Image: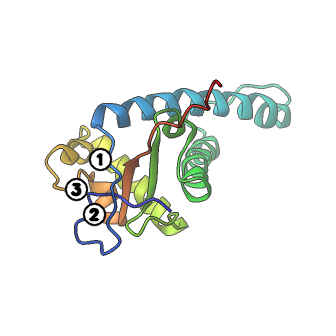
Amino acid sequence: MIKSKNSSNNPLESLMPTPSLLRRFCAITYDSVLLVFMLFILTTFIILPFRQGEGIEAGNILYQVYLISATIIFFSAFWIYRGQTIGMWVWRIRVQQLDGSNITWLQALSRFGLSLISWLLLGIGFWWALFDKESRAWHDRFSKTQLVLLPKPSKPDAS
């Protein structure tokens, strides 16, 4: 359990800083590349064999539902069980509840949905973190979650 120094209304306040917006966007970019690769692999080895190798026609609603569902599960499962996606791990970012515990499925789903709305509104919900006193984006504020910047891992002694 890691608590953020920026949760001023949180009685369990601690010293974890919040990640910069640039660091957050780097993690999102990293995760996007991994997600596209995962969707490609899943489509190639799971979906196409059931279609006897035929391509999926444009606008196929079932395929769109599959892509959206896989994306939601990708992010939500990582957030719930590890507190971070692979991109967040690389950039030392963790998502958590305000008390420092792992987020719930409801928080993960609302966080995902609200972040999608933020993207559709030209990222305004993300840019909001620059002006928020706790550096929280809209989706973090409304889902009652926060991002913390994890410390660099200590290097073992060479002696």
Circle 1/circle 3 CB separation < 8 Å: no
Identified by mark 2, the residue type is: Ser
Identified by mark 3, the residue type is: Glu
Circle 1/circle 2 CB separation < 8 Å: no
Q: Which residue is mark 2?
A: 7
Q: Which residue is mark 1?
A: 118
**Quadrant in the rendering for residue 105:** bottom right
Q: CA distance from mark 1 to mark 3?
A: 18 Å
Circle 3/circle 2 CB separation < 8 Å: yes
Residue 134 is marked as 3
Disc 1 residue crowd, few under 14, some 14–19, many 20+, Cα 10 Å: some
SS of the residue at dot 2?
Answer: loop
- Specify which label sits upstream in the sequence, 3 or 2: 2
Identified by mark 1, the residue type is: Ser
Q: Looking at the picture, does residue 35 appear above or below residue 138? A: above
Q: Nearer the viewer, mark 1 or mark 3?
A: 3
Q: What residue lies at 60% left-to-right and 53% top-to-bottom? A: 82
Q: What residue lies at 21% left-to-right and 43% top-to-bottom? A: 124
Q: Nearer the viewer, residue 11 or 77?
A: 11
Image coords of residue 17 (percent x, y): 31, 48
